[in-house]
Amino acid sequence: MKKSGVKIGFTLAVVASLLCLTAPARADRLFDVSNIGREGTVRSVNERGIVLAVKATGTEQAFPLSQVKRIAVDGVPELERADVALAEGEAEKAIELYRRAQTKTSGKAWMKDYINARLVQAFADSDKSGDALKTYVELVRAKSPLAGQVKVPAVGQASRREADAVLATINAALSADASNPHNSRLKELKIAILIERGDPKEVLPLIEEQLKSQDVETRTQARLKQIDLHLQTKNADAALQSLELARKEVDAAYQPQLFFAEGRAMYLKEQYVAAGLSFMRVPVMFGAMNKALAAESLVWAGKSLQKAGAAEEEIRAVLVEAARDYAGTKGAEAAVQMLKEMDGEQQGQAQQAAK
């Protein structure tokens, strides 16, 4: 009986060891925007995106951040849940889950960068502009390859104190490390903060420097900001000169912004008919592409028509289009307000005539 016990014990030990050997290895799962999943191991992040060693092929494949919908990592369920929440517009929930996942990044340097990149978007989507700015600067200072794939956050609703703190951090970072490959992004953010603070004279020299960048997107954003600054300082001729250069330089995707800027420049020059035509091009040609800008353009077209002395029915038609076709945008709200004001004026004139 004793001998049999030894055999059984030995057999159980062998089975247990075999089970360990044959148990499936833990794997990460990356899902792209088409929701196609790939199993493997996330190795790192680089300039091309998230690098996954794909189990099925035995090869490494890089996925741009914009093409990654979610990543599932064994032992860190919060990461995938956060990605899902962010994709579904639940930014606050995503922030909470990403922060939980941050406590489990030990041994996974890629995950820290990935979470920070996602947090920039989550903070921006939840109107936490100050946190979005700080997180983005952290990403750049860490020289994360993903910094170049994250949209530079808008200053938005960041308080003056938050913006000043971020600006101080940017200045320190630029002074401390001139070799950081993402310094152009920090300069772009610095320009945005200075514009928000109303320091155009300080900004224009920085923009000129950005226009010399090797990075196409950096040059594009610099040119657009240059145009906007000229308009803010009511220098219509300089804005139009920059617009001519922009039309030769920037991608066609920015055409709506250029037509809108052209309308503003012509409005400043009191060429109201030309301004109205430029504004109207935005909804006619790009209405489906950029609804918010289309609605705002229609409002400006309405103002231009008023200044040009157009018939009231023409002005109303433009404003009604903005309110009806682009409901929910700020431009639509402004159009409704203008229509109410016109109704009030008309009513007042009728009452005056009746006296």
Image (cartoon, helix red, strand yellow):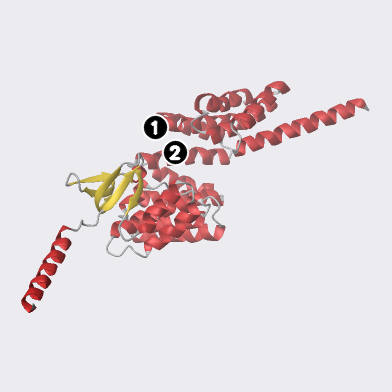
Q: Amino acid at mark 1?
A: Glu
Looking at the image, residue 212 sits to the left or right of residue 126; the answer is left
Residue at the far front in the pictured view:
1
**Where residue 179 sits in the image (x, y, percent)?**
30, 55
Asked whether disc 1 touches disc 2, contact meaning CB atoms under 8 Å apart, the reply is: yes
Q: Residues within 10 Å of mark 1 (few under 14, many from 20)?
A: few
User: Relative to the observer, which residue lies in front, 281 or 261?
Assistant: 281
Q: Earlier in the sequence, mark 1 or mark 2?
A: 2
Looking at the image, residue 287 sits to the left or right of residue 51; the answer is right
Above or below 199: residue 222 = above
Separation of residues labelled 1 and 2 (CA atoms) = 9 Å
Above or below 170: residue 192 = above
**Where residue 205 sits in the image (x, y, percent)?**
45, 46
* Residue located at (74% from left, 34% from top): 340
User: Relative to the observer, which residue lies in front, 82 or 187?
Assistant: 82
Q: Kindly identify which residue carries mark 1.
A: 249
Q: Is residue 133 visible?
A: no
Residue 177, image quadrant: bottom left
Above or below 88: residue 166 = below
**Where residue 252 sits in the image (x, y, percent)?**
42, 29
Report the number of discs. 2
Q: Is residue 49 visible?
A: yes
Looking at the image, residue 219 sits to the left or right of residue 261; the answer is left
* Residue located at (54% from left, 33% from top): 291
Q: Kindly identify which residue carries mark 2.
A: 223
